[in-house]
C-alpha cells in the first residue's frame, strides 16, 4: 500500500493546553512506529486564546517554515522550504466534554498495531481519533497528492469504507486549494458547512448552518445530498506561501506569535470563513469586508464590537480579500466518505459514536486496527459485563454490576456499585464511591446517567479532581426556557423542587433566561472552605442519595 511520506506533522493547540504532553504523545507514536521515524514532529501552541482556526493555521505554517529553514541552514525564514515539502497540520480546536485530552486524543474501542516494518517488533496501543486521522490521510487520501500543506480538523470522525478503492486526482498545475468534501443529507448539513460547487468543480460559495431552502443550490446530481465541508483541505506551496507572508502584513500578523510579541492585539480568524471564503467565486468584496459573509461561521457577528475593533476587522478582511480572492478552491468529493461531528451538546451522540463507531467502516480488513468491546481492560472474576457494553482502559471489580449499552473509559471501579443501562462513566476512581456512612445496599447509578471525573486547574500549581453528573438525553446548550431542556433526564422544575436550589444559585442575575443552559450552570461543587466535598453531594445531584449539607455546599 502506498503511503504519504510526511516531512512535518504539526499539531496546533490552544494556549496553555498541555503542549508538552501532546508533543510527547506524538513522539511516543513515532517511537512505536505509528509515525515514520524521519517525520519532524511539532506541537505549536497558539500565541493567544483568541486567534481562531485561521489564525492557528497561519501561525503554525510560520513555525513550520522556521524549523524547515533552520534545518536547511537558513538564518531567516525562507518560503522556498515549502516548495517540495509534504506537511500535515492538525488543528486541536476547543475543549471536549467527554475527554479532557480533547477530540484528537479521545480513545476508541480498538487497538492499533502492525508497526513491525519500522521498529522491528509489533506494538499494541489503544487507538485514539488522531491515530485514525493520521492513518487515513497517510494511507488512503493523501498518498498521490503533490507537495504542499494539508490542514485537518480533529473535531470529527472521518471514515472511508476500506473495501472501496479511492482514487483522488490532483491536477499537476493546480495552484489553489483543494477542499475535501463528502456527501451528506440536507438535514445534517443544516448543522454544519456545505459548498456550492460550479460545473468545473471550483467552489462558488461556502455556507454554514444554512437553511434547507438555501442548501438546495448546493445539491449534488443525486438530488438529495450536498457536498459537506469535511474539515480537511490541501493547499499548494504557492498558497501556503501566501499565508506565510501574512506574518509581516498588519493587521493579519496579529494572529501569529511574532505580531503578538511585537505588541499587536490578537485578532480572531476563521479558517473557512475568513481564509477560504474570500477565495470562493461568488463572494463579493463588499459582503466579505463588511462582515456580512465572514467571521465566525460565516455570519455577521461584529455587532457587539467597539467601533475601533470593527474597523480593525474590516481592515483585516480587506487585506485578506485582496490577497486571496485570485486563488481558487477546488472541491474534491469523496463519495464514499462519512462525516460524524464530535458534538458536546448531547451525550447520546458521543455514546453512539463509541458503541457504533463509524471509524470501523474505514478499517474493516485493515490488520493494524483490532476492534474490541474490551480494550486494554481487566475485569475481575465474577464480574459479568454485557457484550453490548464497551470498556476502555479500565479495571472492574467483581462487585460491579454493569448494565447494557454502557461506555466505561479510564475507570477503576471497586466497592459495591450498580450501573444502569446506557450509562457513560469516565475517569472514575474508587474514592468517588467511598461514602461516609456505612451502607448495606450498592451505590446505584440510574439508567442513562453520565458521570465524568477529571482534574481542573484553579490557580498556580493548584488543581482539584471533580465529578460531574448529568443525563444522557440532556442537551447542554438548550435554554432552560425550552420545554425540552432537562437535567439528569428530568425537567429543571423537578430538579429545583427536589433540591431546593433556585435558578439564582446557578446563573448570574444579569444573564437572561434565554442564555441560561446546563452548559453554563454553576452546578458542581469544586471547593468548600469549611466542609469537604463528598461523594454523597454528587449523588445527591443525580437524585440517588440524600445529603443534608449538599445544598449549602
Image: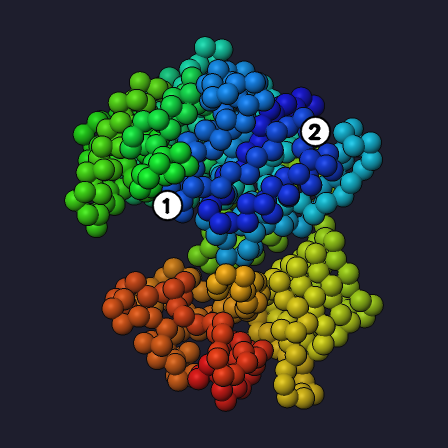
Helix, strand or loop at disc 2? loop
- Labels 1 and 2 touching (C-beta < 8 A): no
For marks 1 and 2 on the same chain, the one whose residue lies earlier in the sequence: 2
How many circles with numbers are drawn on the protein? 2
Marks 1 and 2, Cα distance to the nearest angstrom? 34 Å
Residue 147 point in image, percent of width and height = 53, 18
Q: Crowdedness of circle 2 by 10 Å Cα count: few (<14), some, many (20+)?
A: some
Residue 415 placement, left or right of 212: right
Which circle marks residue 50 in the picture?
1
Q: Residue at x 41, y 70 (%)?
A: 522
User: Viewer-proximal residue, 386 or 47?
Assistant: 47
Q: Tell me which corner region of the image, top left, top right, bottom left or bottom right, holds residue 378.
A: bottom right
Q: Crowdedness of circle 1 by 10 Å Cα count: few (<14), some, many (20+)?
A: some
Looking at the picture, does residue 550 appear above or below residue 195?
below
User: Viewer-proximal residue, 262 or 142?
Assistant: 262
Q: Which residue is mark 2?
A: 37
Q: Residue at x 70, y 23 (%)?
A: 1
Would residue 18 be visible to someone looking at this image?
yes
Q: Residue at x 25, y 68 (%)?
A: 510
Would residue 161 be visible to someone looking at this image?
no
Amino acid at each position: 500500500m502506498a503511503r504519504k511520506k510526511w516531512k512535518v506533522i504539526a499539531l496546533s493547540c490552544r494556549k496553555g493546553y498541555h503542549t508538552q504532553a501532546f508533543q510527547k504523545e506524538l513522539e511516543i507514536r513515532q517511537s512505536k512506529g505509528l509515525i515514520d521515524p524521519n517525520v519532524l514532529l511539532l506541537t505549536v501552541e497558539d500565541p493567544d486564546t483568541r486567534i481562531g482556526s485561521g489564525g492557528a493555521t497561519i501561525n503554525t505554517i510560520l513555525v513550520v517554515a522556521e524549523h524547515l529553514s533552520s534545518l536547511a541552514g537558513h538564518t531567516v525564514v525562507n518560503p522556498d522550504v515549502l516548495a517540495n515539502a509534504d506537511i500535515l497540520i492538525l488543528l486541536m480546536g476547543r475543549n471536549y466534554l467527554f475527554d479532557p485530552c480533547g477530540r484528537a486524543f479521545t480513545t476508541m474501542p480498538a487497538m492499533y498495531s502492525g508497526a513491525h516494518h519500522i521498529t522491528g517488533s509489533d506494538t499494541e496501543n489503544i487507538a485514539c481519533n488522531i491515530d485514525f486521522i493520521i492513518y487515513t490521510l497517510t494511507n488512503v487520501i493523501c498518498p498521490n497528492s503533490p507537495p504542499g500543506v494539508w490542514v485537518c480538523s480533529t473535531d470529527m470522525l472521518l471514515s472511508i469504507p476500506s473495501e472501496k478503492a479511492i482514487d483522488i486526482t490532483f491536477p499537476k498545475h493546480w495552484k489553489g486549494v483543494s477542499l475535501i468534501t463528502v456527501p451528506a443529507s440536507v438535514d445534517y448539513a443544516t448543522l454544519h458547512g456545505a459548498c456550492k460547487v460550479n460545473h468545473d468543480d471550483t467552489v462558488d460559495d461556502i455556507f454554514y448552518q444554512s437553511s434547507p431552502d438555501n442548501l438546495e443550490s448546493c445539491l449534488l446530481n443525486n438530488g438529495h445530498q450536498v457536498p459537506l465541508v469535511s474539515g480537511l483541505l490541501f493547499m499548494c506551496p504557492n498558497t501556503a506561501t501566501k499565508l506565510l507572508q501574512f506574518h509581516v502584513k498588519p493587521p493579519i500578523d496579529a494572529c501569529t506569535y511574532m505580531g503578538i510579541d511585537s505588541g499587536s492585539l490578537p485578532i480572531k480568524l476563521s479558517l473557512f470563513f475568513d481564509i477560504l471564503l474570500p477565495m470562493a467565486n461568488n463572494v463579493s468584496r463588499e459582503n466579505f469586508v463588511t462582515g456580512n459573509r465572514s467571521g465566525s461561521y460565516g455570519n455577521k457577528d461584529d455587532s457587539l464590537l467597539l467601533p475601533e475593533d470593527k474597523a480593525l476587522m474590516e481592515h483585516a478582511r480587506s487585506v485578506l480579500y485582496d490577497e486571496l480572492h485570485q486563488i481558487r478552491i477546488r472541491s474534491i468529493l469523496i463519495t464514499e466518505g462519512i462525516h460524524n461531528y464530535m458534538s458536546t451538546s448531547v451525550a447520546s451522540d458521543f455514546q453512539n459514536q463509541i458503541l457504533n463507531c463509524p471509524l470501523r467502516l474505514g478499517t474493516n480488513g485493515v490488520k493494524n486496527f483490532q476492534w474490541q468491546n474490551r480494550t486494554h481492560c481487566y475485569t475481575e472474576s465474577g464480574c459479568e459485563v454485557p457484550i453490548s457494553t464497551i470498556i476502555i482502559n479500565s479495571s472492574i471489580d467483581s462487585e460491579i454490576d454493569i448494565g447494557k449499552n454502557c461506555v466505561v473509559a479510564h475507570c477503576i471501579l471497586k466497592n459495591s456499585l450498580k450501573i444502569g443501562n446506557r450509562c457513560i462513566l469516565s475517569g472514575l476512581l474508587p474514592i468517588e464511591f467511598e461514602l461516609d456512612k456505612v451502607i448495606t445496599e450498592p451505590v446505584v447509578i440510574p439508567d442513562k446517567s453520565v458521570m465524568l471525573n477529571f482534574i481542573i486547574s484553579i490557580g498556580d500549581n493548584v488543581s482539584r479532581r471533580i465529578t460531574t453528573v448529568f443525563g444522557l438525553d440532556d442537551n447542554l446548550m438548550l435554554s432552560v426556557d425550552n420545554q425540552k431542556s432537562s437535567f439528569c433526564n428530568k425537567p429543571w422544575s423537578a430538579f429545583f423542587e427536589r433540591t431546593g436550589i433556585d435558578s439564582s444559585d446557578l446563573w448570574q442575575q444579569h444573564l437572561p433566561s434565554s442564555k441560561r443552559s446546563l452548559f453554563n450552570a454553576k452546578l458542581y461543587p469544586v471547593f468548600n472552605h469549611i466542609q469537604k466535598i463528598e461523594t454523597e453531594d454528587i449523588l445527591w445531584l443525580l437524585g440517588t442519595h440524600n445529603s443534608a449539607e449538599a445544598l449549602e455546599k
